[in-house]
């Protein structure tokens, strides 16, 4: 499974097929990668642009951070499906300890995605204000994409939370809900 190496058309074909992977979590990760890309485009159209000299250091920092978040999101496209498949295998084995462990792992993906999305949204929101006005709408769309990610992350955590036995981890995930 290398959904993150597919073309958009291939990925969408896989997504709409009668299989559980890729699924919603993978699509959320792709959405975050697209949000990063839109914010990066705005930042790149601002670098070395007349009238934005006061923001160059902040823009360069945003580019570095957004590049890292884009890489993380890209990896989560596949990791979500792997975690889901491992959880389904645990269910088929009917091993409660394995189900609990795999539920923790399956919850960690949307948790990370939620956390990364918060950071990307903050960066994109700032780019709406300080970025090149000709492409500020793209940064604004990145913000909107981020806002669309949160509910899905919460749904995916809720789907697994009842099987988690580690109370510390459970609290960490519940704090998002």
Image (cartoon, grey):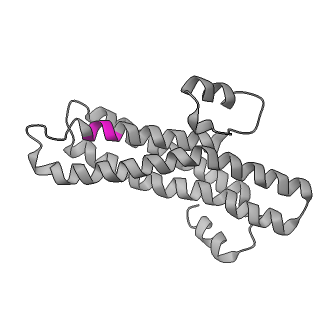
The quarter of the image holding the N terminus is top right
| Horizontal side, residue 65 vs residue 159: left or right | left
Q: Is residue 56 magenta?
A: no
User: Left or right: 86 with respect to 46?
Assistant: right
Question: On the image, which quarter does residue 25 sit in?
Answer: top right
Q: Nearer the viewer, residue 128 or 89?
A: 89
Count of labels in the image: 0
Image point (61%, 66%), residue name: 174
Position in image of residue 79 (x %, y %): 63, 50
Look at the image and say whether residue 42 sits in the magenta stretch: yes
**Where's the C terminus, which quadrant?**
bottom right
Looking at this view, is 116 or 71 the one in front?
A: 71
Which residue occupies 56% across, 67% down? Answer: 175
The image quarter in which residue 19 lies: top right
Q: Position of residue 56 (x, y in %)?
A: 16, 49
Name the residue: 31% across, 36% down.
41
Magenta span main SS = helix
User: What is the magenta range?
Assistant: 39-43
**In the drawing, does residue 138 fall left or right of residue 98?**
left
Q: Position of residue 99 (x, y in %)?
A: 81, 62
In the image, residue 4 above or below residue 76: above
Residue drawn 64% across and 41% down? 24
Say if 42 sits above or below 83 in the image.
above
Is 163 left or right of 28, judged from the image as shown?
right
Placement of 77 over or under 175, stated as above or below: above
Image position, residue 153 (x, y; %): 59, 51
């Amino acid at each position: 499974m290398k959904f993150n190496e597919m073309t958009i058309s291939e990925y969408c074909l896989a997504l709409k097929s009668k299989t559980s992977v890729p699924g919603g979590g993978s699509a959320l990760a792709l959405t975050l990668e697209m949000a990063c890309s839109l914010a990066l485009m705005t930042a790149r159209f601002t670098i070395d642009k007349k009238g934005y000299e006061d923001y160059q250091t902040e823009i360069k920092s945003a580019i570095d951070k957004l590049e890292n978040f884009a890489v993380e999101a890209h990896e989560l496209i596949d990791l979500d499906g792997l975690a889901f498949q491992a959880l389904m295998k645990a269910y088929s084995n009917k091993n409660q300890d394995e189900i609990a462990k795999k539920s923790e792992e399956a919850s960690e993906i949307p948790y990370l995605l939620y956390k990364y999305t918060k950071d990307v949204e903050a960066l994109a929101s700032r780019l709406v204000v300080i970025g090149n006005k000709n492409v500020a709408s793209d940064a604004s769309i990145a913000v909107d994409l981020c806002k669309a990610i949160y509910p899905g992350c919460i749904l995916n955590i809720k789907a697994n939370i009842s099987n988690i036995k580690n109370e510390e981890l459970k609290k960490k995930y519940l704090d998002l809900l």
